[in-house]
Image: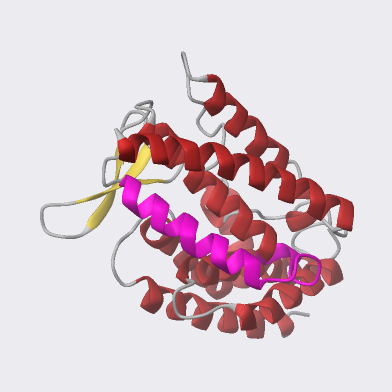
Protein backbone atom coordinates (compact mmCIF):
# COMPACT_ATOMS: atom_id res chain seq x y z
CA UNK A 1 0.00 0.00 0.00
CA UNK A 2 1.14 3.56 -0.58
CA UNK A 3 3.16 5.31 2.13
CA UNK A 4 0.59 8.10 2.51
CA UNK A 5 -2.17 5.58 3.16
CA UNK A 6 -0.12 3.87 5.87
CA UNK A 7 0.45 7.27 7.49
CA UNK A 8 -3.27 8.08 7.33
CA UNK A 9 -4.15 4.77 8.97
CA UNK A 10 -1.55 5.26 11.71
CA UNK A 11 -3.00 8.69 12.50
CA UNK A 12 -6.62 7.53 12.66
CA UNK A 13 -5.87 4.31 14.56
CA UNK A 14 -3.70 6.16 17.07
CA UNK A 15 -6.49 8.67 17.65
CA UNK A 16 -8.99 5.85 18.15
CA UNK A 17 -6.61 4.06 20.52
CA UNK A 18 -6.58 7.18 22.70
CA UNK A 19 -10.41 7.15 22.89
CA UNK A 20 -10.57 3.55 24.10
CA UNK A 21 -10.11 2.61 27.74
CA UNK A 22 -7.22 0.08 27.79
CA UNK A 23 -8.61 -2.39 30.32
CA UNK A 24 -12.34 -2.05 29.67
CA UNK A 25 -11.90 -2.09 25.88
CA UNK A 26 -8.76 -4.20 25.86
CA UNK A 27 -9.52 -6.22 22.72
CA UNK A 28 -10.09 -3.20 20.47
CA UNK A 29 -7.48 -1.03 22.24
CA UNK A 30 -4.94 -3.79 21.67
CA UNK A 31 -6.02 -4.46 18.09
CA UNK A 32 -5.90 -0.75 17.21
CA UNK A 33 -2.36 -0.68 18.65
CA UNK A 34 -1.36 -3.75 16.65
CA UNK A 35 -2.91 -2.55 13.40
CA UNK A 36 -1.33 0.88 13.77
CA UNK A 37 1.97 -0.81 14.58
CA UNK A 38 1.89 -2.96 11.46
CA UNK A 39 1.21 0.15 9.39
CA UNK A 40 4.15 1.85 11.12
CA UNK A 41 6.35 -1.08 10.14
CA UNK A 42 5.20 -1.09 6.51
CA UNK A 43 5.63 2.69 6.27
CA UNK A 44 9.14 2.40 7.72
CA UNK A 45 10.02 -0.43 5.33
CA UNK A 46 8.86 1.72 2.41
CA UNK A 47 10.64 4.82 3.73
CA UNK A 48 13.92 2.93 4.10
CA UNK A 49 13.59 1.27 0.68
CA UNK A 50 13.26 -2.30 1.95
CA UNK A 51 9.83 -2.86 0.40
CA UNK A 52 8.06 -1.02 -2.45
CA UNK A 53 4.99 1.13 -1.73
CA UNK A 54 2.98 -0.43 -4.55
CA UNK A 55 -0.81 0.04 -4.42
CA UNK A 56 -1.39 -3.64 -3.60
CA UNK A 57 -2.62 -5.12 -0.36
CA UNK A 58 -1.23 -7.96 1.75
CA UNK A 59 -3.02 -11.19 2.62
CA UNK A 60 -0.89 -14.26 3.37
CA UNK A 61 2.84 -14.12 2.57
CA UNK A 62 3.44 -14.05 -1.18
CA UNK A 63 -0.16 -13.23 -2.08
CA UNK A 64 -1.43 -9.68 -2.56
CA UNK A 65 -4.74 -8.23 -3.67
CA UNK A 66 -4.26 -6.23 -6.85
CA UNK A 67 -6.57 -3.96 -8.84
CA UNK A 68 -7.42 -5.45 -12.22
CA UNK A 69 -7.90 -3.67 -15.56
CA UNK A 70 -11.70 -3.87 -15.20
CA UNK A 71 -11.59 -2.19 -11.76
CA UNK A 72 -12.15 -5.36 -9.76
CA UNK A 73 -9.60 -6.74 -7.27
CA UNK A 74 -8.03 -10.19 -7.33
CA UNK A 75 -5.32 -12.12 -5.49
CA UNK A 76 -1.97 -12.44 -7.27
CA UNK A 77 1.32 -14.13 -6.43
CA UNK A 78 3.91 -11.39 -5.89
CA UNK A 79 7.29 -10.77 -4.31
CA UNK A 80 7.98 -8.74 -1.16
CA UNK A 81 5.52 -6.01 -0.26
CA UNK A 82 3.50 -5.13 2.82
CA UNK A 83 3.59 -7.59 5.68
CA UNK A 84 0.32 -8.54 7.37
CA UNK A 85 2.04 -9.03 10.72
CA UNK A 86 5.62 -8.47 11.81
CA UNK A 87 7.60 -11.52 10.66
CA UNK A 88 4.82 -12.67 8.32
CA UNK A 89 6.67 -12.77 6.02
CA UNK A 90 10.06 -11.91 7.55
CA UNK A 91 12.12 -9.12 5.97
CA UNK A 92 15.23 -10.90 4.75
CA UNK A 93 18.72 -9.47 4.35
CA UNK A 94 20.34 -6.29 5.61
CA UNK A 95 18.13 -3.85 7.45
CA UNK A 96 18.95 -0.77 9.47
CA UNK A 97 19.22 -1.37 13.24
CA UNK A 98 16.19 0.84 13.86
CA UNK A 99 14.08 -1.38 11.58
CA UNK A 100 15.08 -4.42 13.62
CA UNK A 101 14.26 -2.49 16.83
CA UNK A 102 10.85 -1.63 15.41
CA UNK A 103 10.29 -5.30 14.57
CA UNK A 104 11.33 -6.29 18.11
CA UNK A 105 8.84 -3.81 19.60
CA UNK A 106 6.05 -5.26 17.47
CA UNK A 107 7.04 -8.82 18.40
CA UNK A 108 6.71 -7.75 22.05
CA UNK A 109 3.23 -6.44 21.28
CA UNK A 110 2.31 -9.60 19.37
CA UNK A 111 3.23 -11.71 22.42
CA UNK A 112 -0.10 -10.73 23.95
CA UNK A 113 -2.26 -11.40 20.88
CA UNK A 114 -3.13 -15.06 21.21
CA UNK A 115 -3.32 -15.31 25.02
CA UNK A 116 -5.42 -12.16 25.49
CA UNK A 117 -7.43 -11.92 22.27
CA UNK A 118 -7.92 -15.50 21.15
CA UNK A 119 -7.44 -17.10 24.57
CA UNK A 120 -8.89 -16.31 27.96
CA UNK A 121 -6.00 -14.55 29.70
CA UNK A 122 -7.44 -11.48 31.40
CA UNK A 123 -5.64 -8.23 30.58
CA UNK A 124 -3.86 -6.59 33.51
CA UNK A 125 -2.37 -3.11 34.07
CA UNK A 126 1.08 -4.70 33.61
CA UNK A 127 0.09 -6.08 30.19
CA UNK A 128 -1.32 -2.69 29.20
CA UNK A 129 1.96 -1.05 30.27
CA UNK A 130 4.02 -3.52 28.24
CA UNK A 131 1.86 -2.96 25.17
CA UNK A 132 2.07 0.81 25.60
CA UNK A 133 5.86 0.74 25.88
CA UNK A 134 6.13 -1.39 22.73
CA UNK A 135 3.73 0.90 20.88
CA UNK A 136 5.60 4.06 21.93
CA UNK A 137 8.94 2.59 20.86
CA UNK A 138 7.55 1.53 17.47
CA UNK A 139 5.97 4.95 16.99
CA UNK A 140 9.20 6.84 17.76
CA UNK A 141 11.15 4.81 15.18
CA UNK A 142 8.37 5.16 12.60
CA UNK A 143 8.11 8.93 13.04
CA UNK A 144 11.85 9.34 12.61
CA UNK A 145 11.84 7.24 9.42
CA UNK A 146 8.87 9.06 7.89
CA UNK A 147 10.23 12.48 8.82
CA UNK A 148 13.58 11.58 7.22
CA UNK A 149 12.04 10.48 3.94
CA UNK A 150 9.77 13.54 3.78
CA UNK A 151 12.61 15.96 4.38
CA UNK A 152 14.98 14.25 1.90
CA UNK B 1 -11.40 -21.91 25.06
CA UNK B 2 -14.75 -22.87 26.54
CA UNK B 3 -17.94 -21.74 24.80
CA UNK B 4 -18.87 -19.23 27.49
CA UNK B 5 -15.42 -17.62 27.27
CA UNK B 6 -15.94 -17.04 23.55
CA UNK B 7 -19.33 -15.49 24.19
CA UNK B 8 -17.91 -13.18 26.86
CA UNK B 9 -15.12 -12.04 24.51
CA UNK B 10 -17.54 -11.44 21.65
CA UNK B 11 -19.83 -9.39 23.88
CA UNK B 12 -16.93 -7.35 25.30
CA UNK B 13 -15.83 -6.45 21.77
CA UNK B 14 -19.39 -5.55 20.78
CA UNK B 15 -19.69 -3.24 23.81
CA UNK B 16 -16.46 -1.45 22.85
CA UNK B 17 -17.88 -0.65 19.41
CA UNK B 18 -19.73 2.34 20.87
CA UNK B 19 -16.44 4.26 20.98
CA UNK B 20 -15.94 3.93 17.22
CA UNK B 21 -16.98 6.62 14.74
CA UNK B 22 -17.49 7.04 11.01
CA UNK B 23 -13.75 7.25 10.27
CA UNK B 24 -12.85 4.08 12.19
CA UNK B 25 -13.75 1.60 9.46
CA UNK B 26 -10.65 -0.54 9.89
CA UNK B 27 -11.42 -1.29 13.51
CA UNK B 28 -15.13 -1.88 12.84
CA UNK B 29 -14.19 -4.53 10.28
CA UNK B 30 -11.57 -6.01 12.62
CA UNK B 31 -14.01 -5.96 15.54
CA UNK B 32 -16.54 -7.82 13.38
CA UNK B 33 -13.87 -10.37 12.46
CA UNK B 34 -12.68 -10.83 16.05
CA UNK B 35 -16.12 -10.97 17.65
CA UNK B 36 -17.54 -13.01 14.75
CA UNK B 37 -14.79 -15.60 15.18
CA UNK B 38 -15.55 -15.88 18.89
CA UNK B 39 -19.24 -16.33 18.04
CA UNK B 40 -18.33 -19.02 15.49
CA UNK B 41 -16.34 -20.89 18.13
CA UNK B 42 -19.16 -20.47 20.63
CA UNK B 43 -21.66 -21.97 18.19
CA UNK B 44 -19.39 -24.84 17.12
CA UNK B 45 -18.57 -25.73 20.74
CA UNK B 46 -22.24 -25.52 21.74
CA UNK B 47 -23.21 -27.84 18.89
CA UNK B 48 -20.50 -30.29 19.89
CA UNK B 49 -18.73 -30.08 16.54
CA UNK B 50 -15.46 -28.75 17.99
CA UNK B 51 -13.82 -29.39 21.34
CA UNK B 52 -12.77 -26.55 23.65
CA UNK B 53 -9.18 -26.98 22.41
CA UNK B 54 -10.16 -26.82 18.71
CA UNK B 55 -10.77 -23.14 18.04
CA UNK B 56 -11.20 -21.58 14.61
CA UNK B 57 -8.93 -18.55 14.07
CA UNK B 58 -9.72 -17.57 10.47
CA UNK B 59 -12.09 -19.31 8.08
CA UNK B 60 -9.54 -18.61 5.34
CA UNK B 61 -6.93 -20.61 7.25
CA UNK B 62 -9.05 -23.72 7.65
CA UNK B 63 -8.24 -26.91 5.82
CA UNK B 64 -10.98 -27.41 3.22
CA UNK B 65 -12.29 -30.59 4.81
CA UNK B 66 -12.59 -28.95 8.24
CA UNK B 67 -14.49 -26.02 6.78
CA UNK B 68 -16.82 -28.52 5.09
CA UNK B 69 -17.35 -30.32 8.38
CA UNK B 70 -18.11 -27.14 10.34
CA UNK B 71 -20.36 -25.86 7.53
CA UNK B 72 -22.68 -28.84 7.90
CA UNK B 73 -24.00 -27.27 11.11
CA UNK B 74 -23.09 -23.57 10.75
CA UNK B 75 -22.78 -22.94 7.02
CA UNK B 76 -24.57 -19.58 6.99
CA UNK B 77 -22.60 -18.29 9.97
CA UNK B 78 -19.27 -19.30 8.41
CA UNK B 79 -20.26 -17.74 5.06
CA UNK B 80 -20.99 -14.46 6.84
CA UNK B 81 -17.64 -14.66 8.63
CA UNK B 82 -15.86 -15.35 5.34
CA UNK B 83 -17.52 -12.27 3.83
CA UNK B 84 -16.13 -10.15 6.69
CA UNK B 85 -12.68 -11.65 6.08
CA UNK B 86 -12.85 -10.66 2.43
CA UNK B 87 -13.26 -7.00 3.43
CA UNK B 88 -9.94 -6.98 5.32
CA UNK B 89 -7.40 -6.89 2.45
CA UNK B 90 -9.34 -4.15 0.67
CA UNK B 91 -10.19 -1.83 3.56
CA UNK B 92 -7.95 -2.77 6.52
CA UNK B 93 -4.72 -3.69 4.74
CA UNK B 94 -5.72 -1.67 1.70
CA UNK B 95 -7.04 1.79 0.91
CA UNK B 96 -9.88 1.04 -1.48
CA UNK B 97 -12.55 3.78 -1.29
CA UNK B 98 -15.76 2.91 0.54
CA UNK B 99 -14.30 1.84 3.87
CA UNK B 100 -17.16 3.30 5.93
CA UNK B 101 -19.75 1.46 3.81
CA UNK B 102 -17.77 -1.79 4.10
CA UNK B 103 -17.63 -1.33 7.88
CA UNK B 104 -21.40 -0.98 7.97
CA UNK B 105 -21.73 -4.24 6.08
CA UNK B 106 -19.27 -5.95 8.45
CA UNK B 107 -21.33 -4.91 11.46
CA UNK B 108 -24.54 -6.14 9.80
CA UNK B 109 -22.87 -9.50 9.26
CA UNK B 110 -21.65 -9.54 12.87
CA UNK B 111 -25.18 -8.96 14.10
CA UNK B 112 -26.45 -11.88 12.01
CA UNK B 113 -23.59 -14.08 13.23
CA UNK B 114 -24.33 -13.22 16.86
CA UNK B 115 -28.02 -14.01 16.45
CA UNK B 116 -27.27 -17.40 14.88
CA UNK B 117 -24.68 -18.23 17.52
CA UNK B 118 -26.96 -17.35 20.43
CA UNK B 119 -29.52 -19.81 19.01
CA UNK B 120 -26.99 -22.67 18.82
CA UNK B 121 -27.89 -25.62 21.05
Check if residue A24 falls in the magenta segment.
yes
Q: Is residue A28 above or below residue A33?
A: below
Magenta highlight range = A1-28
Residue A129 in the figure: left or right of residue A149:
right
Q: Position of residue A113 (x, y in %)?
A: 72, 49
Q: Is residue A52 above or below residue B81?
A: above
Check if residue A50 falls in the magenta segment.
no
Q: Position of residue A3 (x, y in %)?
A: 34, 45
Residue B66 in the figure: left or right of residue B10:
left
Q: Is residue A27 visible?
A: yes
Colour style of the rendered protein structure:
secondary structure
The residue located at (62%, 55%) in the rendering is: A33
Q: Is residue B99 above or below residue A117?
A: below
Q: Main secondary structure of the magenta part?
A: helix
Q: Position of residue B113 (x, y in %)?
A: 60, 78
The residue located at (73%, 80%) in the rendering is: B120
Q: Position of residue B105 (x, y in %)?
A: 44, 79
Amino acid sequence: MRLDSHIDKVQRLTALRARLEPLRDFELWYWASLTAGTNMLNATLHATGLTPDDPVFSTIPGVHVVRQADGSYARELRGPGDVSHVGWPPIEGEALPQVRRLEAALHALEEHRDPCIRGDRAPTPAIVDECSRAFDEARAIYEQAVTAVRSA
Amino acid sequence: MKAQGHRSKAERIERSLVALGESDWEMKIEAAMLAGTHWANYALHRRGVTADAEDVVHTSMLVVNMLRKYSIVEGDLLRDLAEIEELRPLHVRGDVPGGAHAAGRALQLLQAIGERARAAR
